[in-house]
């Protein structure tokens, strides 16, 4: 069974977006959810209860389940994330450096399946989508 696909389908059906998920060696299964209206504690409780029942039926093994919002520094994983947050400030970490630099901070100016565009200090920079190791929104202070 593909846990990522199951989570994606279930959460979409509940009106939420799967941002990310992870398992650790201690049996913790952590799920990050989002929605256009934001995430409240009640949303996490609803999703946790639904997933607990689903995991029992599907025999998905875990010791603890944690459901939360992605936080203010939300990771950008999919092309849709980059498009949704165009105009917001973001931090990129590249797999391979460009001109000796792997980390960039700027305003998202668009993305395609091929590249991510970021305005850094007034200059538009283009990064290969495949070269982006991690990307996160930069919290507004």
Image (cartoon, grey):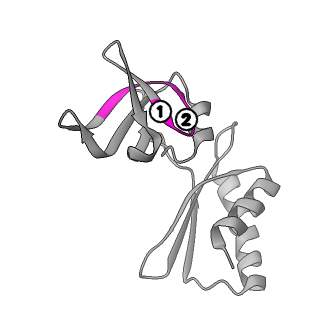
> Circle 2 is placed at which residue position?
82
Boundaries of the magenta span: 104-116
Residue in the image at 49% along x and 25% along y: 88
Instruction: Tell me where residue 84 appears, x and y as whole percent.
Output: 62, 32
Quick check: is 11 in the magenta stretch? no
Packing grade of label 2 (10 A; few <14, some 14-19, many >=20) is many
Predominant SS of the magenta segment: strand
Which quadrant, please, contains the N terminus?
A: bottom right
Visible in this render: residue 129? yes
Which quadrant, please, contains the C terminus?
A: top left
Instruction: Tell me where residue 54 appears, x and y as whole percent.
Output: 76, 76
Residue located farthest toward the top when viewing the structure as drawn? 122
The secondary element bearing badge 1 is classed as: strand
Packing grade of label 1 (10 A; few <14, some 14-19, many >=20) is many
Circle nearer the N terminus (2, 1): 2
Residue in the image at 42% along x and 25% along y: 118
> Circle 1 is placed at which residue position?
116
Instruction: Tell me where residue 131 appears, x and y as whole percent.
Output: 38, 45
Distance from the alpha carbon under mark 2 to that under mark 1 = 8 Å
Q: Nearer the viewer, mark 2 or mark 1?
A: 1
Nearest the camera: 67 or 78? 78
Nearest the camera: 100 or 68? 100
Q: On screen, 105 above or below 15?
A: above
In the rendered image, which quarter is residue 25 located in? bottom left
The answer to whether marks 2 and 1 mark residues whose Cβ atoms lie closer than 8 Å is yes
Residue in the image at 55% along x and 78% along y: 64
């Amino acid at each position: 069974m593909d846990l990522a696909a199951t989570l994606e389908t279930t959460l979409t059906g509940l009106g939420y977006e799967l941002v990310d998920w992870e398992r650790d060696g201690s049996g913790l299964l952590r799920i990050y959810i989002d929605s256009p209206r934001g995430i409240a504690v009640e949303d996490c409780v609803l999703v946790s209860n639904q997933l607990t029942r689903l995991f029992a039926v599907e025999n998905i093994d875990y010791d603890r389940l944690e459901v939360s919002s992605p936080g203010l520094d939300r990771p950008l994983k999919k092309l849709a994330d980059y498009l949704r947050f165009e105009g917001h400030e973001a931090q990129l970490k590249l797999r391979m450096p460009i001109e000796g630099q792997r980390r960039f901070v700027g305003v998202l100016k668009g993305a395609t399946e091929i590249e991510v565009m970021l305005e850094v200090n007034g200059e538009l920079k283009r990064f290969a989508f495949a070269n982006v190791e991690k990307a996160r929104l930069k919290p507004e202070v």
